[in-house]
Image: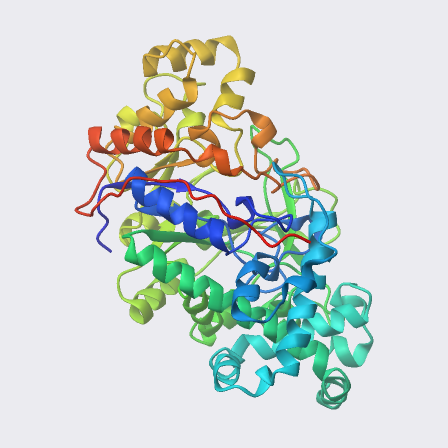
Amino acid sequence: MKHIRTSGIILHPTSFPGPDGIGDLGPQAYAWIDFLESSGCTIWQTLPLGPTGYGDSPYQCFSASAGNPYLVSPTLLLDEGYLSPEDFFDRPAFPLRQVDFGAAIPWKLKILRRAYNNFVEKGGLLTDEFQAFCDENKRWLDDYAMFMALKESNGGAAWQSWQSEYKKRQPEALEAFAAENSGEINFHKFMQFCFFKQWNNLMNYAHEKGIKIIGDIPIFVSMDSSDVWSNPELFYLDDEGNPTVVAGVPPDYFSPTGQLWGNPLYRWPKHQELGFSWWMDRIRATLKVCDLIRLDHFRGFSGYWEVPAGNPTAEFGRWVECPGDAFLQKVQETFGDLPIIAEDLGEISQDVSDLRLKYELPGMKILQFSFGSDASDPFLPCNYEKNFVAYTGTHDNETTAGWFANADQKSRNFAMRYLNSNGEHFAWDAIRGVWQSVAVYSIAPLQDFLELGNEARMNFPGRMFGNWAFRYINSDLTPDLAFRILDLNRTYNRIPEISVKSFVPVEIHYEKP
């Protein structure tokens, strides 16, 4: 796939401002696209957009194909007539700078339930538009909606603890459940209908502005997901649906016991026997919401670390080969030029690099990783090659200002010397270092442009709660900030042949309770 030298910003939609406790796909999302256009950035990178579960992580979703209903904008539902101003009478007050998931999720489900009831009363379930959406997405939507309705009827419990007839998907039991719970099943289909309608409109708006979206596919899926429940033959599970082996990474310099992720592992021989059809469907669904895919943990497509289920750590496991070459061949046959960025971080062996190079996939470079070594460090911009995406940091890292505040003095001194920085505005000096590199794409989190510390960090790997909560406020996106980023893009030749409009912040008013 041909990549053009350009730049972008990482920001998950949950981080948008707005009145409903969590960022959504409403007016502020369009203001964000306007800001990107005015700054000369033509890439918006998100995290996975699926429905989140335990811990609120977008990397542990109830479905690999569904959208996150918490991103549906009640403001847009109001505009469409699915809601009225009276429906907002009990909207709570929410914090501005962070997502309070414990308060935001119940409110979003309550207001979406009201929209669904109004939708049903107006005959929405019978409309051609809704029926066409359900037919087009039948492959995953029926299983997902059934899964979520069953999960709710079981008090939110994981599917392995359900009654046997539901856990093992006995057709008669599922048919009876669907007949008795059609309203709840249709409610989940309605939320997906709203998500994809709103996202498609936003994505079209981005394309009109010359902006492409980088999405994200986690290599593994959550154990408690409709994907595993409806396709048990594709995973290493026992007769009761419990994993026999799980995913992780072995001990390394950063973790003496490794990382035990706990996701079920794929039966790759079965996937290959079926022509990787499940994966092709997954990629096809993801490309409906983005233009390029960051393929998470690319290392696992060459070989993965298998840990016997029940082990308390990832220390005891083994490397297992994966048919990554055959898999990528199938992706290429199906989709043509591979719309993939390989997340090739961590302990990377030569076979992983060879696989990436064979398919000419851009890899990733993280500037924060470079200053604990010397001038030969591969994460220093002077050592980059063109076919890479260069980052100051990602959602898993400290913010750049946070890194600089916490780094040891030797690393700080090297970083300041390398970037010709006095440390006063180190985040911007780091951004400049990445932007002037030869890497085809340069990307930084919005937090770095705002020079925010670790109070704005998106994720602390290994911490179960308190992640994914960062939100900016309206006044953060100023014309001065847009111009400063635009000047950076002009200076380092990262603006394709597109028009750039001045950013004018729009004061967005919401219906008050």
Q: Position of residue 411 (x, y in %)?
A: 46, 14
Q: Position of residue 440 (x, y in %)?
A: 25, 40
Q: Which residue is more in the foreground, 373 or 89? A: 89
Q: Can I make out residue 192 in this image?
A: yes
Residue at x 68% of width, y 75% of height: 117
Q: Which residue is more in the foreground, 107 or 241? A: 107
Residue at x 30% of width, y 41% of height: 38
Colour mode of the rendering: rainbow
Q: Position of residue 353 (x, y in %)?
A: 35, 44
From the viewer's perspective, is 167 left or right of 60?
A: right
Which image quadrant is residue 350 in? Answer: top left
From the viewer's perspective, is 388 left or right of 82?
A: left
Task: Please identify the residue farthest to the left as the structure is shown.
Answer: 497
Q: Position of residue 293 (x, y in %)?
A: 39, 55
Look at the picture and state if 500 lies above or below 245.
above
Image quarter hosting the C terminus: bottom right
Look at the picture and state if 414 lies above or below 3.
above
Q: How many marks?
A: 0
Residue at x 45% of width, y 18% of height: 372
Q: Which residue is more in the foreground, 6 or 174? A: 6
